Amino acid sequence: MAEIRVPKLNTNDEAYVLLEWLVADGAAVRADEVVASVETSKTVEELVSAYEGVLTHLLPAGSDCAPGQPIARIAETLPPGFPPVAAPAPVEDLPAPVGDMPAPPEGMPAPVGGPPAPAGEVSAPAEVVPAPSEGVPAPAPSAPARAPLITEPAQALIDELGIDPARVLALPVKVVRRADVERLVASDAQLPRQPAPTTDIAGRAGTGGPAEAAGPGEPSGPTEDRGGSSGPGETDDLGGAVRGSSARALSANQRAVGRTVSLSHRTIPAAYAAIKVDVGSATKAARDLTKRLRTLVGLPDLLVAAVARLHPDFPLCFATLVGEGTAAVPGSPHVGVTIDLGSGLYVPVVRDAHRKSVPEIAKELAGFRRLAQHGGFRQEQLDGGNIVVTLHHDPDIVMAVPIVFPGQACAVALTSPQREGERTVAVVGLAYDHRLVNGRDAVLFLQALKEALETPEP
């Protein structure tokens, strides 16, 4: 008699919840088959049987369970008369529908299954059952392939987003988890769309836009505003008359921003932390560089340089989540920076920012701002970012919480410098994907930025 015990899944949890059984009590189970799902404070994990036999539940679904606790037993010897455990037949071995089957050769019996379906209808596949030989019992019909099981968190997200159940059931997995649904939604966002007649294209998912950047494949930048007031009795863009108000069409850039923000909130479990920084020394260093080089240098340029230099010490802040347990860590930091001059949000990318001096970064960002005024960005200038710096430098802004752009791990926010007694301070915030970065690492990252800005390199 073998046992299935709960493994240690999360060092922060002393107990988990047995979310659901995926194999019924008393049912046969194959080795390496997923039998249950367990919910921790962070994720939903699958438990797999290492044995083949008959499963007996020791705990009902919904019970608390501790690491190391047995939750099921497996009788490794199947009882007499128990049907053998067999994998579903491959698709190519399944019989074809009767209507598509060729006529049998002369002298051969016709397959069982009844007459062909009427015209215009699709007949169900007929099972071909050969006549048994004398004294040999007829074989039991093979069981149809089992649809994938859907965990409760996955079903909740499916219901929330209104996803077609047929698309979910078509996923090539035995158990559909919330992460599978999130990937399905993300793949929809990356489908190509009809390009608009403009070269002003914002970053795409995973390619360097910020939390607020334009969505995958969507145009960004100045576009003609076709909105306006609906005339008397006219139907507006909302599909019906709106009394006492006027309809205004959103720009392609803003619609893309909306899609990306929605995708981020649906699929990324984000957290946020902020730190107060004395930026007196940084602003003085920027003024000195401006006078010496006759190139405008500001606090954002120093912050971009500081973020890039933290790449070796905090690689996961620049990473991309790949699957459930893997992070793709880039070899170089490519820092996106938000620019919004009133004609649309752009997020150009300072590539290999760790190799560039502050004056070089300042010159590159100045060029980006000029392009933002006229909408002249090339796609390669907007692609490839793996972290973003969002700028909120209007007077009196003391807090800003950016969202994490899909495909990235972090977004750094810089607010307007404020006088606080004898010093000048700014708040630097970090929004981060909690699947990749934990709170302690987020705080250490912010403390390193604070130190870099309070003691800028000469």
Image (spheres, helix red, strand yellow):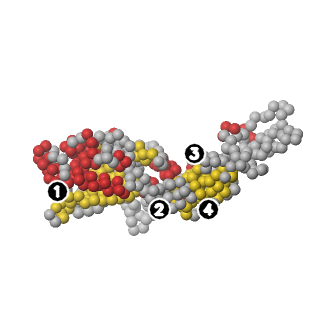
Point out the residue furthest to the left here: 291
Q: 329 and 429: which one is in front?
A: 329
Whether residue 202 can be seen here: no
* Observer able to see residue 351: yes
Q: Residue drawn at (18%, 64%), measured in percent from left and top? A: 420
- Determine the secondary structure under disc 3: loop
Q: Nearer the viewer, mark 4 or mark 2?
A: 4
Q: Residue furthest top?
A: 106
Q: CA distance from mark 3 to mark 4?
A: 29 Å
Amino acid residing under circle 3:
Pro
User: Does the CB distance between marks 1 and 4 fall below 8 Å?
Assistant: no
Is disc 1 surrounded by few (<14), some (14 to 19) or many (20+) residues within 10 Å?
some
Q: Are marks 4 and 2 in contact (CB under 8 Å)?
A: no
Between discs 2 and 3, the one toward the N terminus: 3
- Element marked by disc 1: helix
Residue holding disc 4: 59
Q: Which mark is residue 240?
A: 2
Q: Which amino acid type is marked by label 4?
A: Leu
Name the residue beneath numbered marker 1. 280
Which circle, 3 or 1, is nearer the viewer?
1
